[in-house]
Image: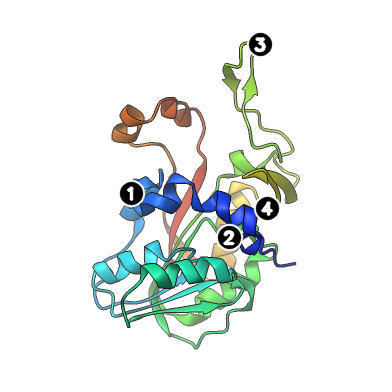
Amino acid sequence: MKQNKYDEDTFFQNYSKMDRSVGGLDAAGEWHELQTLLPDLKDKRVLDLGCGFGWHCRYAREQQASSVIGVDLSGNMLQRARELTNDSQIAYQQIGIEDIHFEQNQFDVVISSLALHYIEHLHDVYRKINHCLVSGGMFILSVEHPIFTARAEQDWHYGAQGEKLHWPVDRYHEQGQRIANFLNHDVVKYHRTMATHLNELIRAGFVIEQVAESKPSLEVMKQVPGMSDENRRPMFLMIAATKD
């Protein structure tokens, strides 16, 4: 079932106040690592799945991509993306990631940032992505890390004084739906093990090129109090894969 929390007014208002929503890629804690996984985008045809406010779409054009299509289920997201975009080579489409049907060899690069953990049946999506990529084309994705998604609580274990004692991991091999609290709302996400993330890509015809597990940059740790705790467990998993 497709979930569209971002078109619920209160949820969208809360999301719009997040640092990454206001400051864009530079305010996204994982961007300094995700950026290194991207190929040279010059003259490339790029697809962004779950494009949100269009930050990656505009970045791709800044890197001289020839054209970009951004896809998102949320009308609120796409309205904001269009307000922030002044580029005829970027097109936005309102459609669920599960429902994409692009032509064979239509894109050179596909990007998906922090969207695929909302998708129940990833294999079908990966097959569609593989279909629309040229041979040798790249797929770069980020999702919430399996260590982060294993428990629906997605939170630290705290001591008597509110100190962060450790990040608990439980039910790791029980894959499937989790009802997590995000921005004070119940949100449906899907937990998968690290092995499943990689093997689903391989089964869909991809070769894994690089894997990264997020950690904050030194600059962010200096600027944001408590950010060093993010080194105690990875929040995001990032994968770069090539169509075989």
Q: Which mark is residue 161?
A: none
The C terminus lies in which quarter of the figure?
A: bottom left
Q: How far across and how far down the image is residue 198, in percent?
A: 55, 56
Per the image, label 3 sits on a secondary structure element best described as loop
Q: Which mark is residue 26?
A: 1
Q: Which mark is residue 116?
A: 2
Q: Image quarter for residue 139? A: bottom left
Compare marks 2 and 4 and give the one earlier in the sequence: 2
Verify CB contact (< 8 Å) between mark 2 and mark 4. no
Q: Amino acid at mark 4?
A: Lys
Q: Answer whether residue 132 is visible to the viewer in this image.
A: yes
Compare marks 1 and 4 and give the one earlier in the sequence: 1
Q: Which mark is residue 160?
A: 3
Verify CB contact (< 8 Å) between mark 3 and mark 1. no
Residue under label 4: 189
Q: Image quarter for residue 164? A: top right
Between 95 and 209, the residue placed more toward the observer is 95
Relative to residue 207, is residue 32 depicted above or below? above
Q: Amino acid at mark 1?
A: Asp
Compare marks 1 and 2 and give the one earlier in the sequence: 1
CA gap between label 1 and label 2 equals: 21 Å
Relative to residue 222, is residue 86 depicted above or below? below
Relative placement, left or right, of 142 versus 61 is: right
Relative placement, left or right, of 36 versus 101 is: left
Relative placement, left or right, of 99 versus 110 is: right
Q: Amino acid at mark 2?
A: Leu
Residue visible at 40% across and 47% down? 28
Residue visible at 50% across and 53% down? 16
Q: How far across and how far down the image is residue 160, in percent?
A: 66, 11
CA gap between label 2 and label 4 equals: 9 Å
Per the image, label 1 sits on a secondary structure element best described as helix
